[in-house]
Image (cartoon, rainbow, N blue to C red):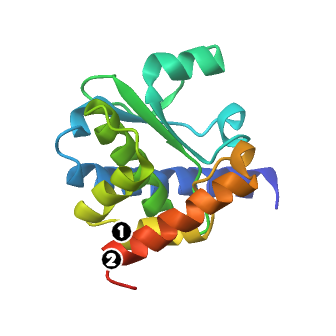
Amino acid sequence: MNLKSLMCYLFMMEDRLLNIFLNVRESFSEIKDIVSLIKPYFELICFSTAWALRIEEFERILGFKPEYVYKSLSEKYAISVQYRVDDVLTTGMVAHEFAKILARENDIFDNSLIDKICVEKGFGEELLYALEDDAISDVLERDLIERLDIDERITNLKKLLGHV
């Protein structure tokens, strides 16, 4: 793949990610005006393919103000996601990050409740796909305890979706 082809591919993935972000955003009306989308920087994706943090937290981690793909009305939170595999998996990741922000706004930090928010917003199947693909768990969290947590989340999500 030459440089021109690579650049075209990267712009295409950014456009697909933006479209997914905007579609998911509409289902999270409570927070849609406070969540921006930033570029997926290497400094972030080497640890996790999806992040949801306050803008100033991203600035602290990166050491600079991140570049926006989509800038919200109020720059309170941002999501950074690497496009992975296909639109369905990436939608699950984006929905999960929106659910984390909605939960955080309500002082909720329990993964099972965050998963439930995804189901209630209509993204349960996509989240299940992302969890089964292991797209959401962080590189640093690959130990047995986290794997058991992911397995438990998958089981609970299947129950919520009526698969079990």
Looking at the image, residue 114 lies above or below residue 159: above
Residue 87 visible in the snapshot = no
Q: Position of residue 105 (x, y in %)?
A: 28, 31
Q: Residue furthest bottom?
A: 164
Q: Position of residue 129 (x, y in %)?
A: 51, 72
Residue occupied by mark 2: 161
- Residue 5 location (% of width, % of height): 72, 58
Q: Which type of secondary structure does the marked residue at label 2 adopt?
A: loop
Residue 47 percent across, percent down from the top left: 70, 40
Q: Looking at the image, tell me whether mark 2 or mark 1 is earlier in sequence order.
A: 1
Quadrant where the image shows the C terminus: bottom left
Front residue of 164/78: it is: 164
Q: Are marks 2 and 1 in contact (CB under 8 Å)?
A: yes
Residue beneath the point at 17% across and 45% down: 29
Q: Residue at x 29, y 40 (%)?
A: 102
Left or right? Give the position of 91 relative to 116.
right
Residue 124 is marked as: 1
Amino acid carrying mark 1 in the image: Gly
Helix, strand or loop at label 1? It is helix
Q: Please, is residue 36 above or below residue 150 in the view?
A: above
Viewport quadrant of the N terminus: bottom right
Q: Residue at x 23, y 62 (%)?
A: 120
Q: Residues within 10 Å of mark 2 (few under 14, many from 20)?
A: some
Judged left or right of residue 121, residue 131 is: right
